[in-house]
Image (tube, grey):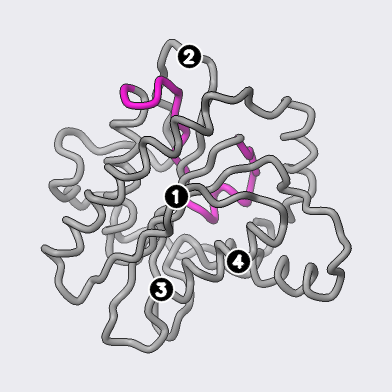
Amino acid sequence: MPGLAKPPSKRDNRPLSHFQPGTSMTEEETTMAEKEEEILVLFGSQRGTSEDAARAFAKEAPQRLNVKVKIVEMDDFLESPSWRTVVVIFVSSFGTGGAPMGAQAFRKFCDRVITDYTDNQDKDGFLKGIYIAMCGQGDSKYQTYQENPKTIVKALTMAGAELVGDVGATDAENRMKQQEEIRQWIETIWDPLSKVLADAPLAEDRLQEMNMNTK
């Protein structure tokens, strides 16, 4: 987003966890499949857990859902919005319920959305027709556990998006358990996403309208 500087990633050269074996990927990557429909995977990660989970999901999704997948860091998405009918988000809380590195501008965008729709309750939701799924990460030692994922869900649903499945709440206090919780959430979300994808996707002109209103 213009005017908002993003700190350089410290994770560019680090190995990915067991969530995704094999070679690392670029920050924005499209995985091709025969079906033309594309889903969007967004991530915001401070220590890499959310990013690894997002990439693991994106690697499996073409085969499990028969779709193309576009995976983008959340702040990069805001620089050039490209909404799709289905959006899957992996993001953590950091500090006192704030956004992690790479999702701070997106959180500010969500805070503005909440304020806007709180002050204008009759306003039409500009994201109506979008379906979102959320897997949140956090540490239950803190009172603000899961606050950032919850805030993002609140903002996007206030703007008209519809939540698919249960919101994942994985706990970094026990890293091994958290990885299992992420895996379990991914396994439970395939069926709800498949049902949503059975319907026709939004028209491109409607998606472009959403992109223009994302600021």
**Residue 165: assigned label:** 1
The image quarter containing residue 80 is: top right
Callout 1 secondary element? loop
Which residue sits at x=36%, y=59%?
A: 168
Q: Position of residue 72 (x, y in %)?
A: 47, 44
User: Which residue position holds label 4?
Assistant: 154
User: Position of 121 compared to 181: left or right?
Assistant: right
* Left or right: 80, with 171 as reference point: right
Magenta stretch contains residue 67: yes
- Which three-letter amino acid code belongs to the residue tagged 4? Lys
Which of 31/195 is in front? 195
Percent position of residue 59, x then y: 30, 32
Q: Amino acid at mark 1?
A: Gly
Whether residue 129 is in magenta: the answer is: no
Q: Which mark is residue 146?
A: 3
Mark nearer the N terminus (4 vs 2): 2
The 10 Å Cα crowd at callout 1, few under 14, some 14 to 19, many 20 or more, is some
Residue named by callout 2: 35
Q: Amino acid at mark 3?
A: Gln
Magenta residues (range): 63-84
Vertically, is 34 above or below 81? above
Q: Position of 34 compared to 212: left or right?
A: left
Q: Label 4 to label 3, Cα distance in Å?
A: 12 Å
| C-alpha separation, residue under disc 2 versus residue under disc 1 | 23 Å
Q: Label 2 is placed on what type of residue?
A: Lys
Q: Secondary structure at mark 2?
A: loop
